[in-house]
Image (tube, rainbow, N blue to C red):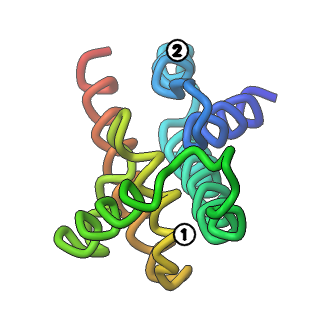
Amino acid sequence: MVYLSLFLTAFIAATLFPLSSEALLLALLHQEHNPVLLWLVATTGNSLGSCVNWFLGRQCLHWQDRQWFPVSRFQLEKAQRHFQRYGIYSLLFAWLPIVGDPLTLFAGVMKVNFWKFLLLVIIGKALRYALIIGFAVAVL
């Protein structure tokens, strides 16, 4: 049940909902749960949550001509220019607060190949969780 809670928290944290998985991860590390298993569960949940954003991004342009669509054509074109400038490798930073979740959503809008998207997101998120766990284990 502990690992399921971490998976769900990491999953939701990667979507556009404001939530953090790090606090739960650190609490579970403090309770001396298996760090490797925690790393695997958190990375998997967080990466799959980003996949939801990618999928939503792929679908959202179907409604771009509606009045209620939250992004203007100008804003969309500006975001496309930024994404093209920084490239697909910016997805390595999908773990960053504030910009990471919209970045994964926009990767879907830009129709980034799903497998490239997934690989880059997993690498970035796995490294982030490894650093958090490594630091926490060294301090505990």
Q: Disc 2 or 1, which lies upstream in sequence?
A: 2
Q: Which label lies toward us, 2 or 1?
A: 1
Numbered badge on residue 22: none
Task: Report the amino acid beneath label 2.
Answer: Ala
Q: Residue furthest left?
A: 85
Residue 87 in sight from this viewpoint: yes
Q: Which residue is mark 1?
A: 108
Which residue is located at x 33 percent, y 45 percent?
Answer: 128
Q: Residue furthest front?
A: 67
Which residue is located at x 56 percent, y 14 percent?
Answer: 31
Local crowd size for mark 1, using a 10 Å CA cut-off: few (<14), some (14–19), many (≥20): many
In the displayed structure, does residue 103 sit left or right of residue 39? left
Q: Which residue is mark 2?
A: 27
Which residue is located at x 50 percent, y 85 percent?
Answer: 113
Q: Position of residue 40 (x, y in %)?
A: 55, 51
Gap between marks 2 and 1 measured at Cα: 33 Å
Local crowd size for mark 2, using a 10 Å CA cut-off: few (<14), some (14–19), many (≥20): few
Q: On the image, which quarter does residue 57 sit in?
A: bottom right
Q: Position of residue 54 (x, y in %)?
A: 58, 64
Relative to 101, is 133 above or below? above
Task: Report the amino acid beneath label 1.
Answer: Gly
